[in-house]
Amino acid sequence: MEIYLICLASALIGGLMLSRLTKLLNLPAVTAYLVAGLLLGPFGLGRLNVPGLGFQTLEQVELMGIVTETALGFIAFTIGNEFRLSQLRSMGSSAITIGILQAVITTIVVDIILIGLHCCFPTIISIPCAITLGAIASATAPAATLMVVRQYKADGPLTRLLMLVVAIDDAVGLVLFSVSFGIATALSNGHVSVLAVVVEPILEIVLSLGLGSLMGWLLNWLEQFFHSRSKRMTISVAFVLLTVGLSSVSFEIAGVHCGFSLLLVCMMTGTIFCNICSTSEELMERVDNWVMPLNILFFVISGAELDLEVLSHPVTILVGIIYILSRSAGKCSGAAISCKLTKQSKPITDNLGITLLPQAGVALGMALTAATLSDGALARNVVLFAVLVYELIGPALTKCALLAVGEIKPEGRTSARRHNKPKM
């Protein structure tokens, strides 16, 4: 137990110290946390086998899953807070159209390019693997985007649209992956499962939205019994923890696998709560301050989870580079096309796609499922390689895009220590 506590402390301190360096380089703090994870991971200081100094094995990092799952739940809960009725009335239909269309276009672009690669070099990648990677390409990581937005206090039309699109992207990606993976499995095994391709993904979305709605309503009902800020914040934190736990439950009914999406459940909880609770904005601000150390741990541990051994496989690097380039082209063109169809301004049309490039947790989860294919190891390694690249450069690109449209407010050089110093 003491070793894990020391590892968590090292992760927090290492991430914070490295953020001072990235600030000098004008890079987002989330980049520092990811790099700190790489340095403290099994391929960095962990190799020294000094107890408490970094994570010595990937298995040790995986044991921190409860921390990353909890942090992801709070991140999703915060993103759900963006779905306020006032915003949905002004850009709800546009966000839904963009969220669906950019994901579908990305999948199509990656599918076409990777299937073309198979036609030219059949031994490198199979069609089932290509189809699966195309669906995984649709997923966007909400955590890195949210951290950049919060760090630089970004606000404006692009930022508000981005938060809605990122949230919608998870549901769309879930459906696209389920359908594509079902087709890939059919091509490999010779039979199609209607349950796996159609019923189960739709049921997962419906169950997730239903559980999230219930939890949001219950949180608002319980919150009314408390009046002090600290107790209301505590009940909010407790409910997010409860929601994360419940979303991990899975069961079967008449042979149909039923489960929940952590991101969808927590997003829906935040959406319902923020729309029916009159004091939700003040509560969310206090919760955000409370979970900041948890968010830092999330990214440091995510950096430590990145398997650098994939860099030793030339085929993985080759397919990975093609995947990254085709996914980037798909996201940028898909966002641009959907923005033009919904008549967005030119700054949004030109920059939205760049902000959708980060990819992490959701894609890695899909890659683990894809690993069951005949050449699923290639799909998993390609996604690992892509996540390594996207997580390191994605936050900086998101910052550049928001800076280009003038929606970033500089952090400034205000010192909290000097600001809070009592006057003589």
Image (cartoon, grey):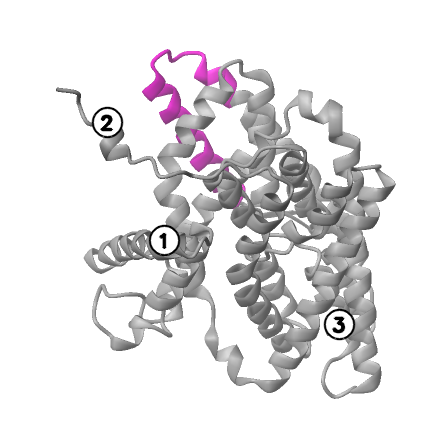
Write the residue at 83% across / 69% down. Answer: 112
Badge 2 vs badge 3, beta-carbon distance below 8 Å: no
Q: Is residue 242 magenta?
A: yes
In-front residue for pair 1/252: 1
Assign a secondary structure to mark 3: helix
Q: Amino acid at mark 2?
A: Asn
Task: List the residue tagged with mark 1.
Answer: 19
Task: List the residue tagged with mark 2.
Answer: 420
Neighbour class for label 1 at 10 Å: few (<14), some, many (≥20)? many
Sequence-earlier tag: 1 or 3: 1
Sequence-earlier tag: 2 or 3: 3
**Prevailing secondary structure of the magenta residues:** helix
Assign a secondary structure to mark 2: loop
Compared across the picture, whether 243 is left or right of 344 comes to: left
Does residue 216 show up?
Answer: yes
Q: Amino acid at mark 1?
A: Ser
Question: Which residues lie in the magenta part?
Answer: 219-248
Split into 4 quadrants, where in the image is the C terminus?
top left
Write the residue at 34% across / 20% down. Answer: 231
In-front residue for pair 401/191: 401
Residue 130 is marked as: 3
